[in-house]
Image (cartoon, rainbow, N blue to C red):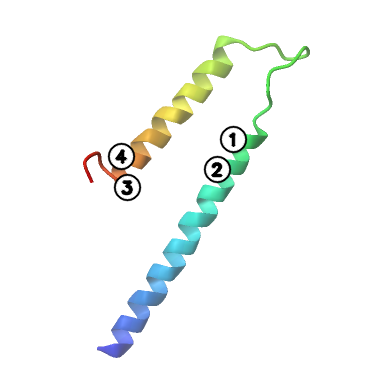
Amino acid sequence: MAKNTARVEDAYTTAHVRALTLLEDLHQIVEDMPAPDADHPINWEHVGSLQHLCERLKELKDFVAPAGE
């Protein structure tokens, strides 16, 4: 039984580190999104893309921590 517990703990730790790494990657991607400037003026595509990203992130958040928990 102890061997199985160690494997499950290792698997959980690996998944936890991967989740944190993916979150860091996503954070960096959002930070690096080019801000509209004189050469690339803001348009509705920028807004739509960012809103779509927000919707997907909200879905993920709700999956991980549903409202009321």
Q: Which residue is mark 3?
A: 64
The residue that appears at 61% across and 39% down in the rendered structure is 29
Amino acid type at circle 3 is Val
Q: Are marks 3 and 1 in contact (CB under 8 Å)?
A: no
Q: Secondary structure at mark 2?
A: helix
What amino acid does circle 2 point to? Leu
First of labels 3, 1 by sequence position: 1
Which residue, given by chain and number where applicable, does mark 1 sit on? Answer: 30
**Type of the residue with mark 1:** Val
**Label 3 vs label 1: CA separation?**
20 Å
Q: Nearer the viewer, residue 10 or 31?
A: 31
Q: Are marks 4 and 2 in contact (CB under 8 Å)?
A: no
How far across and how far down the image is residue 31, in percent? 63, 36
List the residue tagged with mark 4.
62
Mark 3 element type:
helix
The answer for how far apart the CA atoms under marks 4 and 1 are is 20 Å
The tag on residue 26 is 2
What distance separates the C-alpha of mark 1 from that of mark 2?
6 Å
Circle 3 crowding by C-alpha within 10 Å: few under 14, some 14–19, many from 20: few
